[in-house]
Image (cartoon, grey):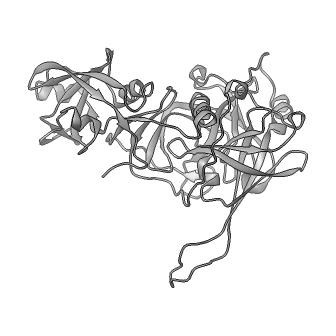
Amino acid sequence: MTRVSPTQVAALAVVGLLGGGAALLGAAVFGAFDGRTTTVLQTEPVSAAIPAASGGGLSVNEIYRRSAPGVVQINTRSDSSSGDALGQFGGPPQQALGSGFVIDRNGHIVTNYHVIDGADEIDVSFSNRDTLQATIVGSDPSTDLAVLKVDAGSRALTPLPLADSDRVQVGDEVVAIGNPFGLERTATAGIVSALQRAVTAPNGYSIDHVIQTDAPINQGNSGGPLLNTRGEVIGVNSQIETRSGGNVGIGFAVPSNTVKNVVAQILQNGQVDRAYLGIYARAVEPELARLFRLPVDAGLLLESVEDGSAADRAGLEGGTEQVVVSGESYRLGGDLIVAADGERVASVEALRDVLAARKPGDTIELQVYRDGKKRTVTVELGRLPTSPQG
């Protein structure tokens, strides 16, 4: 489990997740994610990976009895190949512990990317004490998700259904199942504390629409499911907010709709491909609009444009004048985006969600104000860099 710091206010780079569900925003890395990843391509339809659940609310006991067999413990081993402080190589092997859960009867398992990052060997332990070696089908550092595969008979697997995370509400009761500190298949309960949080992914981008919960989760819970009272997975437990290294009742789960989209792409293509705009932007605040007589009181100020990015090639212009309003710094003088492909964008998150349905090479039309005049700029989207620029 990785510690997450408070979300930065400034928007750094706008990109999108193909197929929707999650959107990303470049930011500094808050958590510690070490190592590398290996990708093994696997092509398979995703329809079987998202079984449906039915029935009314279940007790914690019923949720556990139904879901715990589908939760696995993941142990990884990586051979040290980096030099130590004295320049010596071949240090002791590194081991890591995490959780995951079965998503279909073909042996596919979802976990966090940071659980398997840099692993040379991955062992998956089931509730019947069987331990199998797993291979990495694909991984996505930008959402901290990975898909593994084990060679197991379909009857031995208990897939967990994925819910529609857009229907989750604050106050909903939830259950987390995982392996905190290696204590196998531990259940904890709580509620959904907040929605629409943003946390930092292993590669420095930001994961949006994250679910906050007070269900106790600790190291070893990473990659395990957060379940609703129907026994459906609403998120993948990924990070905690902590100052002591232990649980303080603030945990974060990547939403299940993000999981569906990422898993679909990994199973089909072995990777996730995202569109990229390449701007640094800030939402217009009413006080800013009033003081500087902006043409609109809602939209996005382009503070800067990355050299060579899609936005740069389209001729979008960043700001030139630094101002401070109510203690917040803004850069004025650049383009002011008010809509993307006909959809109003009053926040960075809104623009990211528009881009989430696009892929590299797609074109979008941005409605912008420049020097007080409204115009349309057509942008051919680029491909998301492996890490934020700058």
Q: Residue furthest left?
A: 371
Residue visible at 40% across and 41% down in the picture: 384
Q: Is residue 245 left or right of residue 175?
A: left
Quadrant of the rendered image containing residue 354: top left
Residue visible at 58% across and 26% down in the picture: 170
Q: Position of residue 73 (x, y in %)?
A: 77, 50
Query: Which is nearer the eye, 34 or 32?
Result: 34
Above or below, comparing residue 210 to residue 374 in the picture: below
Q: Position of residue 200 (x, y in %)?
A: 47, 46
Above or below, comparing residue 169 to residue 125 in the picture: above
- Residue 234 visible, this angle: yes
Q: Is residue 330 left or right of residue 203?
A: left
- Residue 1 visible, this angle: no
Residue visible at 57% across and 80% down in the picture: 89
Residue visible at 50% across and 26% down in the picture: 19
Q: Is residue 122 left or right of residue 346?
A: right
Quadrant of the rendered image containing residue 35: bottom right
Q: Position of residue 349 (x, y in %)?
A: 39, 29
Above or below, comparing residue 215 to residue 179 in the picture: above
Q: Position of residue 276 (x, y in %)?
A: 37, 36
Q: How many marks?
A: 0
Query: Which is nearer the eye, 200 or 59?
Result: 200
